[in-house]
Image (cartoon, rainbow, N blue to C red):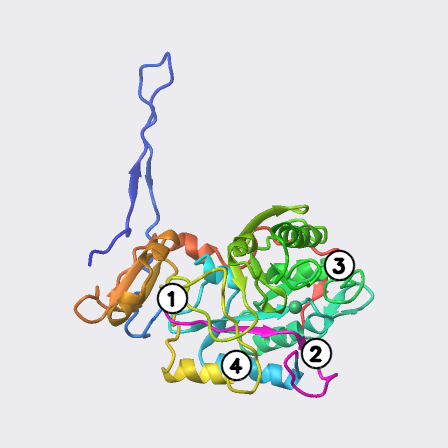
């Protein structure tokens, strides 16, 4: 392997302006010598970026119900879930970053997408003080912030499938008058805001027109709270799909009374960990999620399947510009999808592999490194919100 990009020298010649025959001085611009990036050893971390990724679906996180149900998780159980994921080497990312290939997961770690449906108050509650608001450390996002303060190798990142104000919902995240501030706050922390429809009605029997009005209407209604919100992920209410399969295309793209929309990820309710977006068979309109339940096919069960090796687990090579996997798994790679994401395949080990070690040039991966989940322009809050993590 050849080392690249260590020193780049560019000679720039400036020619004399019209009317002057003398040449101007020739400045030589030399790029600074950047230290080499550390070598990525895909084999050493047993990277497999074709493996499955758990996308966990939460609704309420509180102790009001007093126990865990399909829709409710106690605070203690939610904390336990975060601890389990952390201890088993998972790392939180947004769903959007999974499908657009910008997720930035440290080498050897596995992505997990923590999702919340319905924009319920227990997910993000604010406590008002005289000059500011504080995130309630007992609400789900407050618990995440506290957890990330204690575990600094994690980021407080999640995907929220919100319901806007409608005849069904008073305000996103419950507290009237604070929906806009809450959405902005989550965006400023790198969280993703996703579409969960306008009125939370089943898509099963909707006509294409109704479906497009429902989805575009939700986009418009959430943008009324935060104009620069980008909703590219969708979770179908109740996980229900239009009966007519030909209408599924309207989940991904359409135009209705609320304007035009594009969703690059569409989620079902719950079943099993999702396929890697660069694995053969991945369908962005039918992304699988899991529930946090302490039952078979709940979070702990799937974590067990993924970490025991019974199910293929996505393990990052730490380099967003390449997709690494053991050459023994190469037949499962969707090469076209890898190329479409602007990445290069890196099969390692065995006769077909390029070897575990790759030397990265100094200029490699600069774009990917700058593209985290955080929006380019972090929105401002009308009243400052202090996170529960301090
Ligand atoms: Zn819902």
Q: Residue furthest left?
A: 351
Q: Nearer the viewer, residue 20 or 300?
A: 300
Query: Number of labelled discs?
Result: 4
Whether residue 106 is visible: yes
Which residues lie in the magenta part?
50-71
Left or right: 215 as drawn, with respect to 321 = right
**Dot 3 and dot 4 residues touching (CB under 8 Å):** no
Mark 1 burial class by Cα count in 10 Å: few <14, some 14-19, many 20+: many
Name the residue that disc number 2 marks. Answer: 138
**Residue occupied by mark 1:** 318
Q: Is residue 133 left or right of residue 96?
A: right
How far apart are the alpha carbons under marks 3 and 1? 40 Å
Tell us which disc is closer to us: 3 or 1.
Answer: 3
Circle 4 SS class: helix
Location of mark 4 (residue): 299
Of residue 77 and residue 67, the one placed in the foreground of this image is 67
| Residue extending farthest right | 130
Q: Residues within 10 Å of mark 4 (few under 14, many from 20)?
A: many
| Nearer the camera: disc 3 or disc 2 | 3
Residue 292 x %, y %: 57, 80
Q: Which mark is residue 304?
A: none
Residue 165 image label? 3
Q: Earlier in the sequence, mark 4 or mark 1?
A: 4
């Amino acid at each position: 392997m050849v080392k690249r990009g260590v020193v780049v020298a560019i000679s720039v010649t400036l020619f004399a302006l019209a009317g002057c025959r003398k040449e101007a001085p020739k400045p030589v611009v030399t790029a600074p010598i950047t230290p080499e990036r550390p070598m990525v050893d895909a084999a050493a971390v047993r990277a497999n970026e074709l493996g499955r990724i758990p996308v966990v679906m939460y609704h309420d996180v509180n102790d009001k119900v007093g126990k865990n149900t399909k829709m409710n998780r106690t605070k203690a159980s939610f904390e336990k879930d975060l601890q389990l994921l952390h201890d088993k080497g998972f790392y939180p990312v947004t769903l959007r970053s999974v499908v657009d290939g910008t997720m930035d997961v440290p080498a050897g770690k596995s992505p997990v997408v923590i999702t919340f449906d319905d924009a319920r108050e227990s997910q993000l509650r604010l406590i008002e003080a005289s000059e500011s608001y504080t995130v309630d450390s007992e609400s789900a996002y407050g618990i995440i912030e506290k957890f990330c303060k204690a575990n600094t190798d994690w980021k407080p990142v999640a995907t929220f499938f919100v319901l806007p104000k409608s005849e069904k919902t008073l305000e996103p995240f419950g507290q009237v008058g604070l929906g806009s501030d809450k959405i902005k706050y989550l965006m400023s922390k790198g969280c993703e805001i996703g579409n969960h429809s306008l009125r939370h009605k089943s898509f099963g029997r909707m006509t294409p027109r109704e479906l497009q009005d429902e989805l575009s209407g939700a986009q418009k209604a959430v943008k009324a709270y935060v104009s620069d919100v980008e909703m590219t992920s969708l979770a179908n209410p109740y996980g229900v799909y239009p009966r007519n399969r030909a209408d599924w295309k309207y989940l991904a793209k359409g135009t209705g009374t609320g304007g035009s929309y594009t969703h690059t990820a569409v989620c079902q309710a719950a079943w099993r960990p999702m396929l890697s977006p660069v694995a053969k068979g991945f369908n962005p309109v039918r992304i699988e999620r899991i529930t946090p339940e302490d039952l078979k096919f709940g979070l702990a069960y799937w974590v067990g399947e993924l970490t025991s090796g019974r199910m293929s687990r996505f393990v990052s090579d730490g380099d967003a510009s390449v997709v690494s996997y053991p050459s023994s798994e190469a037949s499962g790679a969707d090469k076209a999808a890898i190329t479409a994401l602007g990445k290069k395949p890196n099969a390692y080990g065995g006769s077909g592999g390029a070897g575990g070690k790759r030397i990265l040039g100094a200029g490699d991966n600069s774009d990917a490194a700058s593209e985290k989940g955080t929006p380019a322009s972090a929105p401002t809050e009308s009243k400052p919100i202090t996170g529960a993590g301090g």
